[in-house]
Image (tube, helix red, strand yellow):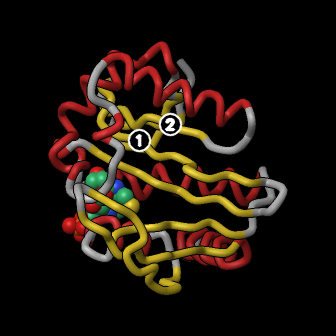
């Protein structure tokens, strides 16, 4: 299977309906961490629901309205990144992510999200990349900061999670900001 190297034996790979069994086994390992803040694990509880979620994303990909990718370490599925929303005509997308506990603290999601944002901005002409995150999700907020995103504000009681309305921060990076940050990183890398 083709893959984008993320360094340290990690790679970003397609995640497709035929991998539903592996996706469910991974989500069972990730469930406690993911359940804290988002509904992804609640939507993947048995082989049928795992297949349904990956099939929904395969349909989104066919319609160019969303995509999902797996992060593997040493071949094992340990997390992923996705375009929850993708609208090339409007120039907007929203990126999301998750990991199982064994894969946190290594920068994997930050590096994987950079690959998605580079592709969205440089190949698909996306102008605005959004990140929506619970105000209580400090780890995900740190990812948005590392990606150079700007905190725009809070959507109060924006979604229902485990019986409670949750406030969501909206973060974003715009294409010119993304390119400027990439160019200054390149310049630093090539500095004498
Ligand atoms: C959100 C989530 C994916 C963040 O995981 P994470 O491991 O903190 O994120 P990354 O993979 O980008 O790793 C960053 C961490 O690795 C460290 N790190 C090590 N090497 C690094 C590198 N080369 N580059 C960047 N970070 C690196 C960072 O310091 C950071 O740790 P810190 O936050 O303690 O400072 C994880 O908490 C999760 O799955 N949560 C549940 C699902 C969820 O909330 N999803 C987001 C919904 S909005």
Q: Quadrant of the C terminus?
A: bottom right
- Residue 1 placement, left or right of 102: right
Which residue is under mark 1? 80
Query: Is 12 drawn above or below residue 105 in the view shown?
Result: above
On the image, numbered disc 2 is attached to which residue? 69
Instruction: Give the secondary structure at mark 1.
Output: strand
Does the beta carbon of the residue at mark 2 sit less than 8 Å from ligand 1?
Answer: no
| Picture residue at 46% right of the left edge, 67% below the top | 132
Under circle 2, the secondary element is strand
Image spot of residue 115 (x, y percent): 56, 50
Q: Nearer the viewer, residue 90 or 126?
A: 90
Q: Are marks 2 and 1 in contact (CB under 8 Å)?
A: yes
Q: Is residue 185 above or below residue 9?
A: below
Considering every residue shown, the one lying at the far right of the view is 89
Circle 1 residues within 10 Å: few <14, some 14–19, many ≥20: many
Looking at the image, the residue that sits furthest to the front is 163
Q: Is residue 55 left or right of residue 49?
A: right
Disc sitting over residue 154 in the figure: none
Q: Using the rendered view, name the quadrant where residue 188 is placed.
A: bottom right
The residue positioned 62% from the left and 66% from the top of the image is 129
Alpha carbon distance from label 2 to label 1: 5 Å
Mark toward the start of the polypeptide (2 vs 1): 2
Q: Tell me where residue 182 appears, x and y as whole percent.
A: 62, 69
Which residue is drawn at the image coordinates 71% and 71% (left, top)? Answer: 175
Q: Position of residue 60 (x, y in %)?
A: 65, 36
């Amino acid at each position: 299977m083709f893959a984008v190297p993320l360094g340290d034996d990690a790679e970003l790979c397609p995640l497709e309906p035929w991998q539903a069994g592996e996706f469910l086994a991974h989500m069972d390992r990730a469930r406690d961490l993911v359940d804290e803040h988002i509904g992804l694990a609640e939507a993947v509880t048995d082989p049928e629901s795992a297949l349904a979620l990956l099939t929904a994303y395969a349909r989104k990909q066919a319609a160019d309205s969303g995509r999902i990718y797996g992060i593997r370490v040493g071949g094992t599925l340990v997390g992923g990144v996705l375009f929850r929303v993708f609208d090339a005509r409007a120039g907007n997308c929203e990126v999301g992510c998750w990991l199982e506990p064994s894969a946190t603290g290594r920068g994997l999601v930050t590096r994987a999200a950079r690959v998605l944002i580079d592709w969205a901005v440089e190949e698909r002409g996306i102008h605005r990349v959004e990140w929506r995150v619970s105000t209580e999700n400090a780890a995900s907020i740190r990812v948005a900061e590392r990606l150079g995103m700007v905190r725009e504000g809070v959507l109060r009681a924006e979604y229902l999670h485990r019986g409670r309305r949750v406030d969501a921060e909206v973060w974003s990076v715009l294409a010119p900001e993304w390119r400027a940050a990439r160019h200054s990183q390149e310049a630093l890398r090539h500095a004498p």
